[in-house]
Image (cartoon, grey):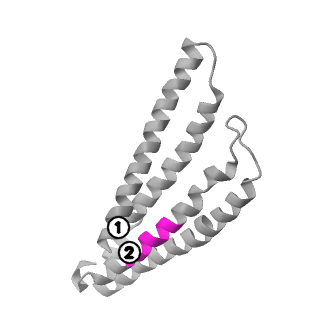
Amino acid sequence: MNKLREILTQTLNVLAGASFLVMVVLTCWQVLTRYVLNNPSSWSEELVSYMFAWMSLLGASLVTAERGHMNIPIVVEKCGPGVQKALLCLAEVIGFLFSAVILAYGGFRIANLAMGQMTSSLGVPIGVFYVVLPLCGILNMVYTVLNIAEIMKKKEGTA
């Protein structure tokens, strides 16, 4: 399971990093075309906004992998080790359900609906950019299952 986590995390790091790099290059291109060439590039601005969404959602999946989402640890730390495990698993189950219903199912539905609409500057179906929603939903579901397995595997005093 650790090997799967490593491969997924490495791939997500590369994709999120590549998204950021593309955003930086396209933003520089926008500045060049707007202020130096006096001929603004509308397609690059649109693509940057979609790349930002991709980078953010891929980053959220990386945070899920690290169990780094916001929480209030003082509540969990006051409990005994068994209750700590249960609460940590409950948090992961809630994350799994959110990812399954909102991101995977809802994202799949919205991506399908948006396939008929085209972006204004790029001429690409908007649904192509929305594919990141179900993709990240599935990744989050995989990570939450891996996180639960890791929590359950830990010894009683180290939850």
**Which picture quadrant has residue 48?**
top right
Q: Amino acid at mark 2?
A: Leu
The nearer-to-camera label among 1 and 2 is 1
Question: In which quadrant will I find the N terminus?
Answer: bottom left
Placement of 136 over or under 74, stated as above or below: above
Q: Main secondary structure of the magenta part?
A: helix
Within 10 Å of the Cα at label 2, are there few (<14), some (14-19), or many (20+) other Cα atoms? some
- What residue do we see at 54% from left, 12% from top? 36
Residue 148 is situated, as x and y percent measured from the top left of the image, at 38, 78
Q: What range of the chain is rendered magenta? A: 138-148
Q: Amino acid at mark 1?
A: Arg
Badge 1 is on which residue? 5
Badge 2 is on which residue? 146
Counting every numbered tag in the picture gives: 2
Question: In which quadrant will I find the C terminus?
Answer: bottom left
Residues at circles 1 and 2 in contact by the CB criterion of under 8 Å: yes
